[in-house]
Image (tube, rainbow, N blue to C red):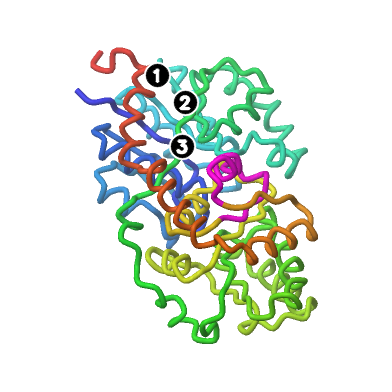
């Protein structure tokens, strides 16, 4: 009999970004590797677009409960659903920290005698814990700390995340397994020119691409002024900012900042919104390099995607793939400072070997981040928690 894994996550909302996307790729890869995978998630309101249809197509059993109430995502069917599902699985894999579904998953896994693994998805990193700090300290003391002390294993996506969380001294076994890519999306790549055809005002101008959720942690308030300062030396270069905004007010603040810096929207810089599926890869193919100056990224799957598309990478030291990028010479590591970021962008634009760096990024990334290979690794990882899955 195959291993049976139950994933519990607050949301599968596509617009929620990192955690739901990471779980979607992970669960799909595990199912393709022969693990019997189930997911329990909630949704806050009707009509939310989720990864559930994709996961169902991949053979994953998905239970969605909602609409939920409050920021903790409470729902009356959560506890009975988990009580029914947990005993039918060999391991309970919890994604995130703060919401009611996760608290119940921790509690019931221990009560029903099933091992629990936690993927914190960067939420235990220093930067993350400093955000809404008082609320998180209260919740840790109220109920979370006892769960963290009883977790059987922690899943980290990088050695950097493992080292960061290691400062707490929790006894759960640390296991490092990266996220991955569906290489069928990136090999072969789409033809060049498709993104430019959708945004003809770009013309044939070279551009740097930022592609991620528009959120204050992504460092856009540093990127925009840094890029504005480049215009005198590099007047032909453009900046494309792609991704869904945290909210309308935040997008408006970025547009106001662009105007205050003297840049003309849709001429020198472009806000193009969320790019789905092949659209995001087309945006990468037409770009000259990728930039992500985040204050914190647990993994940064978009960095791997950009590398797979053949882009040189300019990322901050707080993206946990920074050591991978640096050791493989796939781009430039920068810091959270406008002038330093400007220098990094300038150096990248001036590189004579930019195309060579992009080719190296593509070959290295395709070798290291294949979901098919990573999915098979989970059989061994879960097996260490459930030595007799047939029992």
Residue 324 on the magenta span: yes
How many neighbours does mark 3 have within 10 angstroms: few (below 14), some (14-19), or many (20 or more)?
some
Q: Look at the numbered disc 1 and give the secondary structure of its residue.
A: loop
According to the image, label 3 marks what residue? Answer: 178
Taking the image as shown, residue 342 lies to the left or right of residue 248, namely right
Residue drawn where x is 54% and y is 74% of the image: 272
At 55% from the left edge and 67% from the top edge, which residue is drawn?
242
Residue 123 horizontal/vertical position (percent): 62, 38
User: Can residue 73 be seen from the camera position used here?
Assistant: no
> Residue 314: image x %, image y %?
62, 55
How packed mark 1 is, by other alpha carbons closer than 10 Å (few <14, some 14-19, many 20 or more), is many
Report the residue marked by disc 2: 117
Asked if the magenta segment contains residue 7, the reply would be no
Question: In the rendered view, would you say 73 is above or below 340?
Answer: above
Instruction: Please provide the residue range marked out in magenta.
Output: 313-330
Going from N to C along the chain, the mark reached first, 3 or 2, is 2
Tell me if 252 is positioned left or right of 94 in this view. Answer: right
Q: Residues within 10 Å of mark 2 (few under 14, many from 20)?
A: many
Q: Say which mark, if any, is on residue 114.
A: 1
Q: Is residue 210 above or below residue 60?
A: below
């Amino acid at each position: 009999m195959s291993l049976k894994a139950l994933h519990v996550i607050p949301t599968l909302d596509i617009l929620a970004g990192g955690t739901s996307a990471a779980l979607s790729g992970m669960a799909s890869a595990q199912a393709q590797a022969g693990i019997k995978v189930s997911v329990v998630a909630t949704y806050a309101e009707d009509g939310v677009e989720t990864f559930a249809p994709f996961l169902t197509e991949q053979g994953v059993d998905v239970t969605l409960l909602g609409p939920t109430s409050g920021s903790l995502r409470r729902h009356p069917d959560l506890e009975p659903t988990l009580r029914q599902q947990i005993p039918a699985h060999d391991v309970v894999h919890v994604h995130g920290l703060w919401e009611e579904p996760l608290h119940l998953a921790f509690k019931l896994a221990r009560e029903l005698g099933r091992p629990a693994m936690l993927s914190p998805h960067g939420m235990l990193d220093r930067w993350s814990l400093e955000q809404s700090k008082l609320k998180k300290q209260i919740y840790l003391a109220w109920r979370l700390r006892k769960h963290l002390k009883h977790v059987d294993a922690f899943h980290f996506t990088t050695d950097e995340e493992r080292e960061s969380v290691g400062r707490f001294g929790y006894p759960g076994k640390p296991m490092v397994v990266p996220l991955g890519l569906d290489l069928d999306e990136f090999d072969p790549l789409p033809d060049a020119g498709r993104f430019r055809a959708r945004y003809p005002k770009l013309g044939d101008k070279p551009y740097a691409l930022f592609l991620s959720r528009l959120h204050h942690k992504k460092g856009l308030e540093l990127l925009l002024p840094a890029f504005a300062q480049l215009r005198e030396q590099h007047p032909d270069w453009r900046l494309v900012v792609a991704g869904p905004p945290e909210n309308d007010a935040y997008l408006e603040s970025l547009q106001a900042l662009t105007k205050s810096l003297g840049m003309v929207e849709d001429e020198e810089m472009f806000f193009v919104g969320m790019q789905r599926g092949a659209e995001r890869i087309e945006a990468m193919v037409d770009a000259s390099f990728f930039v992500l100056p985040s204050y914190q990224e647990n993994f940064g799957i978009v960095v791997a995607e950009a590398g797979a598309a053949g882009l040189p990478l300019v990322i901050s030291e707080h993206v946990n793939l920074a050591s991978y990028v640096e050791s493989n010479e796939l781009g430039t590591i920068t810091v959270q400072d406008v002038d330093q970021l400007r220098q990094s962008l300038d150096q990248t634009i001036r590189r004579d070997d930019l195309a060579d760096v992009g080719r190296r990024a593509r070959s290295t990334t395709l070798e290291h981040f294949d979901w098919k290979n990573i999915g098979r690794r989970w059989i061994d990882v879960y097996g260490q928690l459930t030595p007799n899955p047939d029992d």
